[in-house]
Amino acid sequence: MSIDRTQALVLSKRDIRETSIIVDFYSKEFGKLSGLLKGIRSEPEKFASNLEPFSLNEIIFYRKTHSSLHLVSQADKLDNFTQIRSSIEKTTQAGFMMELINSIMQAEDKNEEIFNLAIVSLKELETNYNPARIATIFKIKMLNLSGFKPHFDSCVSCGDIISGQARFSLSLGGLLCPRCMQKDPGSRSIFRGTIATVLHIERNSFAASLNLGMNPQIKKELDIILNAFLNFHLGKELKSQRLLNKLEVAV
């Protein structure tokens, strides 16, 4: 059993017994970790953080070799992203980002690019007036970096580059060219602008993606396709996505 230190975002937490909690973290050096914090509910002063969702902490933990649950001995808050917490929509978008990471990433599968993407996205959420756009960019980049992404580069069936009409196949996980459309009668049409937007976001920086023009029609189609893709391939709808849908209807 080794002692390690890392920066980590809180993905989720749950109570265990009367005094302790289990926290799912996404860490810079080790990927997704589950940590047991003993006594934090009865003696919160033992830790320098209350481990709120999507807060950034520096943790010290005893990494067990024969268990996926590690013992966290210290947690110091580095950034609580306080400005996000003043907005219900921003808080829910941040929660969605953490839930998506938790749902897609395997335990201790290190991906520093995803950690950095999450930090950049949270910092942008604090100050940007358009949280929904930030969440869409995060979603596309997260799927791309994790290898879980839908296939927008070429036909998912034959591999040919698509220069004209295309359809999106939910079951096959990508675009179909005119010759292959019959392989999924349930595939749906998709705007060329939507395809171009996804490819631009995948290939460019977060800042460049924020400056990309995205009309409401393309934004709506992006959300419909990406959310349907996630629901289909994860086998569930994320709880935070359901809440975002309700907030959107309320507005």
Image (tube, grey):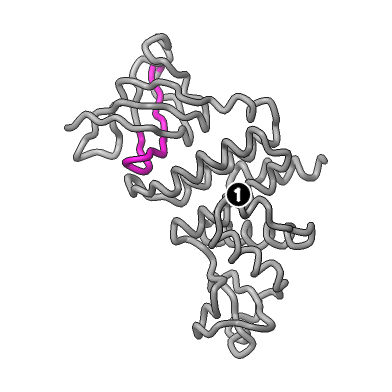
Q: Quadrant of the N terminus?
A: top left
Residue 236 image point, x, y percent: 56, 53
Which amino acid, mark 1? Ala
- Above or below residue 215? Residue 168 is below
Q: Quadrant of the C terminus?
A: top right
Q: Quadrant of residue 182?
A: bottom right
For label 1, count other residues whose C-alpha is less than 10 Å away and answer few (under 14), some (14-19) or many (20+).
few
Picture residue at 46% right of the left edge, 56% below the top: 145
Identify the residue position indicated by label 1 in the image. Answer: 207
Residue numbers of the magenta segment: 18-34
Picture residue at 51% right of the left edge, 53% below the top: 142
- Above or below residue 62? Residue 118 is below
Q: Nearer the viewer, residue 142 or 187?
A: 142
Q: Is residue 187 magenta?
A: no
Picture residue at 55% right of the left edge, 82% below the top: 161
Q: Residue furthest left?
A: 1
Picture residue at 46% right of the left edge, 30% below the top: 56
Residue 103 image point, x, y percent: 47, 48
Q: Secondary structure at mark 1?
A: helix
How many numbered dots are placed on residues in this image? 1
Residue 82 image point, x, y percent: 60, 24
